Every structure is written in structure tokens, then in C-alpha cells.
Image (spheres, rainbow, N blue to C red):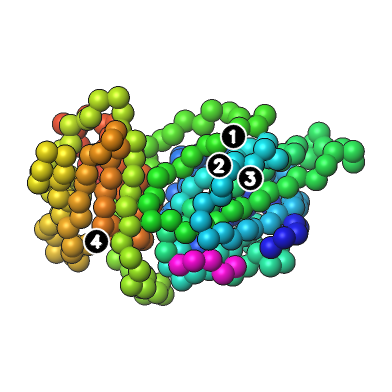
Amino acid sequence: MDSFVRQGVDYCQYQVRSAPYWRTGMEIFVVGDDLLHASSSTECTGFAGTHTGGIQMRVVVLDGPPDEISDDWDAISETTLWCPHGELSVHALMGGSGEGLDAISVPPGLIRIRAHARDRIHEVTRTDDDPPEQHELLVWPVSEEIGPLTLREDHIRRGREQKRAKAAVYAMLDVIRPYGTHEDHDPDLPRVTVVRRLPGTMPKLARRLPVGDRSVHLTRTGADTFEWRWTGGSAALPDDKPSVVRIENGSLRHEGVLGRHAVMLGLIWDHLLERNPDDPPAWERERAE
């Protein structure tokens, strides 16, 4: 898509989806900045200056990451989505896609979204002399989920608080959920890696994470490696294959995870890396309350 098209926005929001919309995503103002918020493994929310009306939008699909960060935009942010069937769509909050913004062909699997915005002026203060508000989404395939990232901020910056515990509750419930009756099972795509930067000192990792009647066992297998394995429970396990957690060059790498779990496991690790390992994880605290 070379040219911009009109895309509707409602309450300053539009949504980017890499799978059919069929369930409630995570609330806004939980994870993200003032341009892009994580909603689920297959959805994110973009924020416009326009409250209700239209903005100019285009989507550019790339084979790999951009060579540079463009100087032409006021705000730039990134996030990752799981795209099981190779289609991406942009929607207004209340529904409706601009011309050519529905069912865009993209690489199946894990994809990175870089959102650009400029001239985000609220309609109350916008005049006829102001340039139109424009947004651009760059999309490319990745094999690693590195979490939300702010590359540039504009005047709308409000310093959003990251509610990592709340995000982890949603994420864990999403990881353990069974497939819905109307939900297609994900295709057989390669497993991927979740990457997170470690805090200044390596936190102590719990050897067991309770998740209702199931649990995750983290077993040390080397000086800097652990096995992540699901056990127990009467329901099917989220993943019957173990994966590897590796500490390397100041980062935690969770390798060999299912693509549909990657974004959610990233949110879970964000919580685990900042919590006291002697305390129950956020999803268990909420269940107890």
C-alpha cells in the first residue's frame, strides 16, 4: 500500500487484528505507551489525536525489519502479534476498515508492528490550516517476541503506568484457555522465542509456579539454563512439550514456545522478573481473593 486511505477512529482508537475478533481483549491503559497498547496475542490498539472521525492510514508489509527509524514521524512505537493465518486488518473501534485495510496478506507466524503517527491534533483545537493526521504501520516477520517498545514520543506523552501484574493475570488465563468451539486451531508453524532484558541483577526464579490445579516447573539444567515444563491438572496442558529458559548477555530467552503463547508469555515474564519470588504470582492472588 503506497498511498494513504481514510480510516475511521472512535474515542481516539483504532484496532489492529491478526485473527478474527471473537473475544474480549485486555483493557487499554495496561501495557503500552500513548501510541500503541497490547490487547491480546492477536490484537493491539492504536491511539489517534482525532476523537471521532477519520485519519489517514497506510500499511506497508516488509520482508524484514526496517533499515532505520524514520525522521518523518512524531511518534513511533512497536509491539508483536501472533498471526496464525497470514492476514492482518485495521478496524475502527466501533467497526469498519478503510479501503484495502481489511484482510491484508502478511507472513503467517509471529509479526512485528511498528506504528508511526504525526500531526496528532485533537479535533477541538484542529483548524483548517493544520495538516491531516497520518498513521503508518510497518509489518514484518520475526522469530522473537521482544515486548512493546517506544522509539519516539510526541506531545501527547502522559507517562503511562505499566500494570504488569494485571497484564500477567490476563496473559496466564489466555495461555491456559482451551480453544473455543468457533476458533480454528493454529497451523503447524515454527516455535519461537520470548526475549526480555533482565533488571540490574538476576532475580531469583521460583522453581514452581502454581496455576490453579496445574503448575509450571522450572528445573535448572545448566549454569544458565532451565527447563520450563507444564504438569498436573485434569484439563489438557497448554503445551505438552518442555521449553528452555536461557540467561544470556543480560537477557532472558524463553526458547521453543508456541507462537500463540509468545506475546502472553512475554507479559508473564514481565511480571515474574519484577515480583518477589516468595509471593504468589498475580493470577493466584486474584483467584484467592
- From the top left corner, tell me how far across and down residue 5 is, in percent: 75, 59
Residue at left 24%, top 61%? 238
Q: What's the distance in space between the residues labelled 3 and 2, CA to CA?
A: 7 Å
- From the top left corner, tell me how far across and down residue 273 is, in percent: 28, 34
> Looking at the image, is mark 2 or mark 4 nearer the viewer?
2
What amino acid does circle 1 point to? Arg
- Label for residue 238? 4
Q: State the extent of the magenta-drawn residues as a range.
A: 104-108
- From the top left corner, tell me how far across and down residue 251 is, in percent: 30, 37
What is the crowding at mark 1: few (fewer than 14 residues within 10 Å), some, or many (at least 20)?
Answer: some
Residue at left 44%, top 34%? 162
In the figure, 60 relative to 279: above or below? below
In the figure, 248 relative to 8: above or below? above
Report helix, strand or loop for mark 3.
Answer: strand
Is residue 155 left or right of 231 when viewed as pictured?
Answer: right
Q: Residue at label 3?
A: 116
Q: What's the distance in space between the residues labelled 2 and 4, CA to CA?
A: 30 Å
> Looking at the image, is mark 4 or mark 3 nearer the viewer?
3
